[in-house]
Image: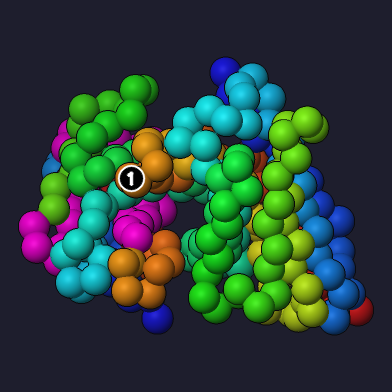
Amino acid sequence: QLQLQGSGPGLVKPSETLSLTCSVSGGSISSGSGYWGWIRQPPGKGLEWIATIHYTGRTFYSPSLRSRATISVDMSKSHFSLELSSATAADTAVYYCTRQDGTDSVNWFGPWGQGAPVIVSS
Amino acid sequence: QSVLTQPPSASGTPGQRVTISCSGSSSNLGSTYAFWYQQLPGTAPRLLIYTNNQRPSGVPDRFSGSKSGTSASLAISGLRSEDEADYYCAAWDVSLKTWLFGGGTQLTVL
């Protein structure tokens, strides 16, 4: 059974870069639609999509975070990662990694990782 | 303020049928599919409905989805205490080129 394990620094100082990794086990990084995504949830608030990557390297970003976000995939290590530069308190959230199921043209967020909490504070 | 609009709360008694709405626009729900996610307290969201009305394996048939025009709905019949959770709709916006989530609806089972 596919498992997604997100991990991150826990605490990041303002203006620093927030880095997260999602390890994929129980399935290939080319499985599902081949797309993998990051979604975050600030405390007590709703869900916000950040970025998606195809295992071939094609990337998609939220317009509001495009300038600060970088998503990447490492097939040899079966993981994908997210970096968010110039962190501020507004980036404090639980960050979820997901596999997007479906097809190349129609896909959705299927299995989710357990979430990696990140606090941005000095 | 979310582009997909959901009521912030809903409630029902055990056994009842409740419906949660999700209102969008021509560039999202009017052009693409609706998806629904359930988030139990303290856990990650899980997929409940995909492509408007399909249930992943393991989701009870008490949950059903529909879409008409620029709105979508999630219906839960035979309400149970374990259905108490936050429910989110989602859709791709073809103009903004972004995934959108509704603000979420907190369901209380009285």
Please tell me whether mark 1 sits on a helix, a strand or a loop: loop
The residue at 79%/32% (across/down) is A77
Please state, as top left, top right, bottom left or bottom right, where the C terminus of chain A lies in the image. Answer: bottom right
* Residue B62 or residue A116, whichever sits in front: A116
Residue lying farthest to the left in this orientation: B68
Residue A67 is one of the magenta-drawn residues? no
Please identify the dominant SS of the magenta region. Answer: strand
Q: Is residue B12 left or right of residue A32?
A: left
Q: Is residue B1 left or right of residue A121?
A: left
For residue B4, above or below residue A122: above
Task: Name the residue that disc number 1 marks.
Answer: A106
* Residue B98 or residue A121, whichever sits in front: B98
The residue at 81%/59% (across/down) is A19
Residue B77 is one of the magenta-drawn residues? yes
For residue B99, above or below residue B87: below
The image shows residue B4 at horizontal and vertical percentages of: 30, 70
What sort of colour scheme is used for the picture?
A: rainbow
Q: Chain of mark 1?
A: A
For residue A99, above or below residue B2: above
Residue type at mark 1 is Val
The image shows residue B73 at horizontal and vertical percentages of: 18, 54
Q: Is residue B9 left or right of residue B17?
A: right
Q: Within 10 Å of the Cα at label 1, are there few (<14), some (14-19), or many (20+) other Cα atoms?
A: few
The image shows residue A35 at horizontal and vertical percentages of: 52, 43
Give the magenta-colored segment's residue range: B68-92
